[in-house]
């Protein structure tokens, strides 16, 4: 049986409660009462880059979507995107940690999923097609991600990889 990995909140994002207060390692983020509805919202956390972090971060994202009252139509896309991006960071980056940041646009029409690592890929980086706004997602799993995304970018700033995916929210 896998134990839930330790998830640390990202400073400045909505707080993450401790695992003792939630059964089965489900770690929903708490909303901030000082943030007006409709304002830009962010929630994020850092976890060890291990296979146990993939389902834990997927649960975190799903719980945050529920907290923000996002439409149920985004559930499948959000779970697939988080699973694929975090899974890639765990399998290929060699990073000690993986960062997940969720951002809801001011008008609550776009959810951005950012996954970052600070590792060096253990295999050659795949060739990715170029689009007008930068590098697009590539690879088989990332092709599924891109099918759900309105925008998908992969960057390699300094050390590590930063993947940013935008999902349109339909109410």
Image (cartoon, helix red, strand yellow):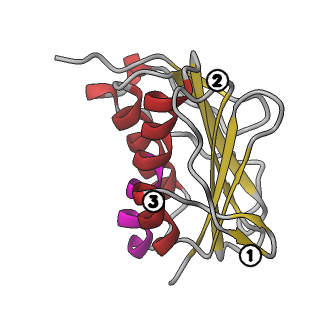
Q: In percent of the image, x 38 and y 42: which residue is there?
A: 59
Compared to 167, does 140 lie above or below?
above
- In this view of the protein, which residue sits in the foreground, 154 or 104? 154
Is 30 displayed left or right of 11 in the figure? left
Q: Is residue 63 visible?
A: no
Q: In percent of the image, x 57 and y 40: which residue is there?
A: 30
Compared to 129, does 142 lie above or below?
above
Upstream in the sequence, badge 2 or badge 3? 3
Please tell me how crowded label 2 is: few (under 14), some (14-19), or many (20+) other residues with Cα within 10 Å: some
Q: Which residue is mark 1?
A: 107
SS of the residue under disc 1: loop
* Quarter of the image where one finds residue 77: bottom left
Residue 131 x/y as whole percent: 73, 73
Q: CA distance from mark 2 to mark 3?
A: 24 Å
- Frontmost of labels 1 and 3 is 3
Q: Is residue 141 magenta?
A: no
The magenta region covers 72-82
Q: How many marks?
A: 3
Q: CA distance from mark 1 to mark 2?
A: 34 Å
* Quarter of the image where one finds residue 161: top right
Upstream in the sequence, badge 1 or badge 2? 1
Q: Which residue is mark 2?
A: 119
Q: Which residue is mark 3?
A: 78
Q: CA distance from mark 1 to mark 3?
A: 19 Å
């Amino acid at each position: 049986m896998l134990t839930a990995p330790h998830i640390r909140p990202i400073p400045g994002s909505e707080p993450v409660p401790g695992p003792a207060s939630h059964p089965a390692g489900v770690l929903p983020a708490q909303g901030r009462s000082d943030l007006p509805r409709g304002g830009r919202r962010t929630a994020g956390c850092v976890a060890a880059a291990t296979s146990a972090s993939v389902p834990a971060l997927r649960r975190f994202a799903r719980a945050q979507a529920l907290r923000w009252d996002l439409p149920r139509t985004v559930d499948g896309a959000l779970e697939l995107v988080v699973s694929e991006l975090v899974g890639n960071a765990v399998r290929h980056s060699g990073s000690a940690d993986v960062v997940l940041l969720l951002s809801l646009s001011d008008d609550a029409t776009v959810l951005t999923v950012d996954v970052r690592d600070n590792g060096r890929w253990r295999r050659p980086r795949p060739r990715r097609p170029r689009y007008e706004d930068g590098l697009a997602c590539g690879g088989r799993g990332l092709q599924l991600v891109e099918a759900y995304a309105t925008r998908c970018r992969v960057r390699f700033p300094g050390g590590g990889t930063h993947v940013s995916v935008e999902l349109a929210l339909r109410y």
